[in-house]
Each structure stands twice: as structure tokens, then as C-alpha cells.
Image (cartoon, rainbow, N blue to C red):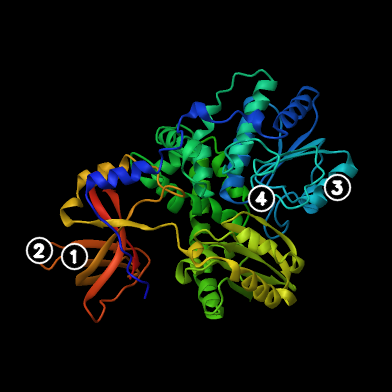
Amino acid sequence: MPTLPEVPLLDHTTLESFLACRFEAQSEKLSDIPHPTLLKDAQKGAERLARAIMSGEKIALVGDYDVDGVTSTAIVKRFFDLIPYPLITTIPNRFNDGYGVSKNVLERLDADVIFTVDNGINAIEAAEVCKMRGIDLIITDHHTPGDTLPDAYAIINPKQCDCSYPFKEICGAQVGWLLMGLLKQELNLTIDMRQFFPFLALAVIADVMPLVGINRAIVKIGLEMMSRSTLSPFVMIRDFLNRPAISSEDIAFQIAPRINSAGRLEDASIALDFLLADTTERAYHQFELLTALNTLRKETEAQNTAEAMLQVNPNDTIIVVAGEHWNEGVVGIVASRLVSHFQKPAIVLSIHNGIAKGSGRSIGNVDLYTLIKSQETHLQKFGGHKMAAGLSMSSEVVEAFRQGINHSAKTISPEDFIPHNDIVGELEHEMINFQLLELLERFEPYGEGNPRPRFLIRDADVIAVKLFGSDQSHSRIELRPSRVSQKTLELIAFRRTLECPESKKMSCSYTVNKNEWNGRVSLQLMMERIF
């Protein structure tokens, strides 16, 4: 069992001070969003797109199949509809095309200018094809560049070593949006770029960007706008969530998985059609499809996770598992499940026709991209960033890759493997009240870089453990934290079936959330980790 951490006893005042310290050095003013001209090649890219529009050239956009990529595509398509100017839009199919602006995708595009959103930084081959065909390729991306960059007309990515954009941790949708802002200036248009904030909020949250500084400002305003937007997709999201205000956690746990499921299991165009829906009927129809796909995704993921768990070598520092015909669309989620269970970075590969292709997820401060790069002699392709990456290799070298990456990981400090979701302290029973809820709401939105505070319950008496839900897959645990008081706390553990421990004692971490149901507001304590 994990060691019980030493944490301070908190009251509301000390908790408020702790949370306020997270943001002391970060500006949260929208006016402090750095100007897009600071992005290397952004002005050059905007000028080329403007020339193409003014001379009637064919322009094509290549997106990506995750939430960030689909949302990026929706922002750009909506922007071009406002000009208005025809835009050829395509999102690669994960199973038929692979990732990004591949040769396969280029074969079906007839355009003078092609630009990407949320992909392309490693598209060396695609850039060569474009050069041969006389197509100007403009790449907008936010993933970590490799040692060699594509020979493209323009590359817009804040993570380029010679890019002066000061805020590096932005998502693909933000890069695309900044480019559209410059294009607006080039064309001398009066489009309000703030209208895209709800889409940006969706992408920033789903792509797990740090919710600090300008990201926090955009998400805060974006969620507020989402709560009153008349655009069909956001009307649908509000109806589905059935609550007056939308939180970052609603997006992360309810909406993003549904949008992601289209690209994971079928085709991302289903999700794009949802975000572009111009009637509520259309939005409802697409959302129903996404919900059905998400249910199927959960079933597939559960099956693949169970098989992957059996393969894990407990002595490895970095988990590497591979399975014949595991669903390529869910391997990233399976990797996340393994990370959560084993508290180690995990790479999950699906083998088809001798090729092992998959995703990795990291933990704490472990730079997974650098670890994978150390084994690039084994790899056919790889890309991503510190916390998440995609890769492919011959199935014959999977074992050599596993041994190699674990050898590289020996130099990493054990402290780097500690998750960032540290417990902030213990709360006395009487501190868990509506005043606490109001305090916590003042520091929303929560997410990467600003995690919802986790609290500790130490050596509590277990009064009862009950299962609930249609399939009895959730647990309700009643605890008495203090022997001198008869007061108890009720904690909820969704998608976990727990039993009363033999010792009738439990130590665990939990978060405090607002539960709104039929107009009634209550506190909901969500169990996180059992010690």
C-alpha cells in the first residue's frame, strides 16, 4: 500500500492562501495574450493565405482526429465561413490515413495552399510531396519538433527553438486561432475573435494544457460564454449537462470523451459535424452518435485494459505492452489507466500486420517524449510532448524498445515519478461545508497546472460500504473520521466496486465538488486514492 503522506491541517483561511499562491506570478488578463506576430512565420503564413483568398486560389485545411484537432478545424472552418471563402476541410482517418498530413491525405487534396492545424511538425515526407506538386504548405502545430523540420512554406509552432512567442504551452486550436487573427488583419475584416473562446476552452481543457496565465483567462471566459451561447453545439452541451454553469471538469469528463470517441472508433467527421452544426436538430443527432460511440469506446477500452494489465512487467520503470489487434483508437486511454494503476509512465501498442502502433502517457515530471526519442533507432515514426506521445515500430523490435527505454529511464530521479496531484492537507469535519464550496469555486477552472485540491482522511472508521447504479459498479462509503465525534462523511467512488476492509479502517484522499440535481445543491465528496 502507498505510504500515508504528511500534510498540514487546514482551515478555510490557510486553504485560500495556498490556492492564491498558485497564480501570483501569472497574468490572467486577456489583454496580455502575446501578439500573434511573435509566433515565428505566423505573419508570413497569414500573408500567403490572404493572397490566396484575394486571387481565388484553392485552400485546403488538414486537421487532426482528437478534440484539439477537431476543434481547431471547426474554428478555422467557422472563420472562413464568416469571410466568406470556400475551404476544403479534411481530418485524417486514424485507421486508413494514419496521423497528420500524410501522403495518403495529400493524394485526395486538389489545392494551391494547404495548411494544417494541430499536426505537421514532423511531416517531412508530406512537405516534399507538396514541394514537388507546387503546393505551399503552412504548418501550424504545438507538438515538440524533431531534430529535422519539414521543408514547408511556413512553420508556426511556439515550441520551435527560434520562436519568440513567450507562452509555449498552448494547444493546437490556440495556434490556429492566432493565425486567423493575423489573417483577419491582413484582410482588414471586422470579425470579433472572442466569439471562438468557447471552442478554445474546449480544446485547452481536452488537450490538458496548464490552466494558468492566458490559458486560464481564455478557459474562464470561454466557459462563461459556453453557458449562454446560442450556437447549436453549446445549446446541446448545456441540455445534456442540465446545469446552469459549465465547469472545466464537465468538459474533461463528460464532453471531451464523446468528441474524442468519433476519431478513436470511426471517423472524426462525426465530431466535426457536431461542432459545426447550424441547427439544434443537427447538433442533437450528432451528439447521439457521439454518445453511442463513447459507450462502445468504454467497452472496448475495458477489454483492452484487462488484457494489457496481464502483460505488465512489475519490475519495469516504464511500462511497455503490445497486443495483436487491440483497438488503435483506445490505446491512449488504456495507457492512462495503466499509469493510474501502477503510478508509472505507460506505452500501449496495437499490432496490425507486423506494425506496432500506439500511444504513451507519462506521470509527474517524467519527460516521455525525450525517453521515446532515446530509442528512435527502433522507431518508424514518433511525436508528441512531455506527457503524451504517439509512436510506431516493427513488432519485431518491441522487446528491444522496452528494454532500451527502461535502460534510459534509470537516470531519472525517483522524485520525478511522483504525481502532481499532491494532497494539500487535512480538513476538520466542520470545515467541510458550503463556505468551503464557495471558496473552491473562486479558484476555478481546475485542471492541469491548477488541480482541484485533494484532501486527506486519516485512519477513519468504515461504517458502511454500499454499491449503487444500474450495474452496481459505483461505491458509496460512509466514514467516521474521528472517534470523539459521531458525525460521519459520505464519499462516492464512481466506476469502482469497493469492499469494507478487514481492519474496518480507511485512509484516503478526496475532492469536494458541487452536486446539482433537480434544482438542489449539495456537497459531494469524491474518493480519489486509498492508502
Per the rendering, the mark at residue 198 is none
Label 4, on which residue? 144
State if disc 2 and disc 1 touch (CB < 8 Å): yes
Q: Secondary structure at mark 3?
A: helix
Disc 1 residue type (three-letter): Pro
- Closest to the camera, between mark 3 and mark 2, is 2
State if disc 4 and disc 2 touch (CB < 8 Å): no
Image x and y of residue 105, in percent: 77, 50
Image x and y of residue 102, in percent: 77, 52
User: Cα distance, mark 3 to mark 2?
Assistant: 72 Å
Which residue lies at the image location 77% right of the left edge and 29% below the top edge?
48
Q: Secondary structure at mark 4?
A: loop
Which residue lies at the image location 51% right of the left edge and 50% below the top edge?
208
- Closest to the camera, between mark 3 and mark 4, is 4
Q: Quadrant of residue 324?
A: bottom right
N-terminal-most mark, 2 or 4? 4
Quadrant occupied by the C terminus: bottom left
Mark 3, residues whose alpha carbon is within 10 Å: few (<14), some, or many (≥20)? some
Label 2, on which residue? 485
Disc 2 residue type (three-letter): Ser
N-terminal-most mark, 3 or 4? 3
N-terminal-most mark, 3 or 2? 3
Label 1, on which residue? 481
Which residue lies at the image location 19% right of the left edge and 61% below the top edge?
489
Label 3, on which residue? 128
Disc 4 residue type (three-letter): Thr
